[in-house]
Amino acid sequence: MSVDADRPSTPRALRRLLPFVRPALPRLLAGMAAGLIAGLVALAIPQVLQVLVDSALQQGDASAVLPATLVIVGLGVLEAAAILVRRWLVLTPNTKVEASMRNALYEHLQELPVAFHDRWPSGQLLSRAVHDLNLIRRWLAFGLVLLVVNGVTVVVGAALLLAIDPLLGGVFLVSALPIWIVAMRFEKRYSRAARRSQDQAGDLATAVEESVHGIRVLKAFGRGPHALKKFERQAEELRGTEMEKARAIAFIWRWLTLIPDATLAVCLVIGVALAAQGQVTAGSLVAFFATATVLRFPLESIGFLLSFTLDARNATDRFFEVIDEPVLIGDPASPATIEKPAGRLEFRDVHFRYPDAPDGAPDLLDGIDLVLEPGETMALVGLTGSGKSTLTALPTRLYEVTGGSVLLDGVDVRDLRLGELRRHIAMAFEDATLFSDTVRENVLLGSRDGSDETMREALAVAQAQFVDDLPDGVDTVIGEEGLSLSGGQRQRLALARAVAAKPTVLVLDDPLSALDVETEELVEAALRRVLSSTTALVVAHRPSTVMLADRVAVLEEGRITAVGRHSDLLAENEHYRFVISSLDDEDTRDEPRDGDGPLDGPEDGQPRGDEDPRIADERTEVRA
């Protein structure tokens, strides 16, 4: 069965908007009523003209001209007022509909698991949140209202034409049959192109977002022309689809213009013949053609309204594609609580595999058994690809275990509310993500008290005193994703954010990788004080990070193969010695870290504002 056959009809698809539209429905219906009044008033003017021509002009009754003129002027003013009221009624409530839909989409995106965001390009989500919802708002305010108003106007106008003269009215109505045939063909042709166009626009937005985000990489490798060619290719595909839509619209407009004009020409010939035989009056002919003229826009608008409605339907489908995504990681129906959290973290026979893993492939984590006692610091080491970062994402349920369980103080983390769970467990990632906000807001993002004292303590632990040298101190707004800062500065702020949350369990995914040796030593010393009362799981990619730990767990091919003290594992475990030697090799191959290279320091070669001059002098001596 084809995809089109599986799709619900356009009315059924658009009906899904009703829960969001319901608050605005009274004013929307009132706007339709105002539009109908405007359309019916416009149809009344030809009837006044008929009376005027038949009485005043044919019978020579000049006294009827002025009253008829005043009536026509009054009807025109009434029509204009009704149109004004219609627009006033529908515009404001539909902006609220758009806002509620956008808020619902954003809230749902926050609730969806990380696995969803791994699959969906950000540009596609952005185009749905902005372009598609804007299109739906405009359709509700104009497309839907005009569709109803113009439809009723055409029906009433057709009845008036039949009342004026059945023969002429019948000819006019017969012409509607080919218009509907053309409209049906147009719907099939345009709908596919419209959906493809919206998807391609989302892909293009993704390409722009990725290029802007990675502009430093593109410039550094001289790949700007390559990115431009890729962008041009995608833009050309979108242009081709838009041209296909334009041809479809031109196709229907051709017939919507030709058929009514040809019909009026036929009616004119028949009408003149009937008038010559005395079967219709001159006033009836004037009223007939004036009414047909009023119906001209409603008939011609069929193409525009059809394309608009199909665009809105596709936008609605795209919106609900995201809304319909199930929230697989959520609060339990009967949540448990931890009255006095101690920080005991246990992985019990934990298995994990990604949803898109090929059939037959082994689990990425294959039966993890590991216990962290309250206040203990556990280092997690393993070769690249062994699953270290994935394991650290399981306690906070960024990903859900596919087998076994993760326990916090004896309670399965799936039995806790997500809010409570993530108050007890905080994370700092290797890839430090900051938000375009002040330093204060970034550091206190997960803090419960939000006090300056908490912020200052966290900044001191992370050795992030450089913030005081920023233009507005901790109230400085850092750029998008913190790219105005060096890599080490971003990592220190991300570490401070995790520390400021004052969690029971702290999960650190190699948060010191971008720091220079001296700063790392200072941070580690401060962390030892913090971790003395906090359970910590630390992913170690550098031997110096292992020194933070009370015990070390070795992760090998998805299993914990050894747990013990660093010195004991060095003496007893060959694989651990190999991993540690690999970490040493990686450490020597690392790119310049914060303060070690031109990418992170000021352009003039001066010491950074966040660097102690004594450290800079010692570094110079070491290098010499």
Image (cartoon, rainbow, N blue to C red):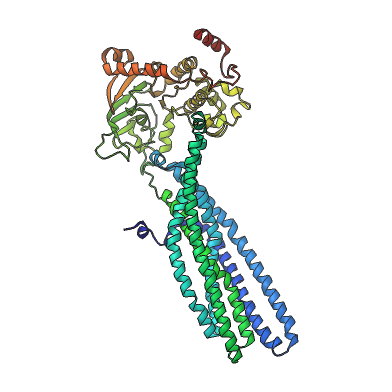
Q: In this view, does 579 lie to the left or right of 188?
A: left
Which quadrant is home to the N terminus? Answer: bottom left
Looking at the picture, does residue 105 appear above or below residue 436?
Answer: below
The answer to whether residue 192 is above or below residue 487 is below
Q: What residue do we see at 44% from left, 70% from top?
A: 181
Camera sees residue 132: yes
Q: Residue at x 55, y 53 (%)?
A: 96
Q: Nearer the viewer, residue 378 or 435?
A: 435
The answer to which quarter of the image holds residue 533 is: top left
At 24% from the left edge and 38% from the top edge, which residue is drawn?
360
Up/down of 364 relative to 79, above or below: above
**Between residues 12 and 51, which one lies in front from this camera angle?**
51
Q: Which of 130 and 350 is in front in this view?
A: 130
Q: Is residue 246 above or below residue 39?
A: above
**Residue 563 picture location, percent across and down:** 29, 20
Q: Tag count in the figure?
A: 0
Picture coordinates of residue 416 (x, y %)?
37, 37
Position in image of residue 410 (x %, y %): 32, 31
Q: Closest to the observer: 406 or 513?
A: 513
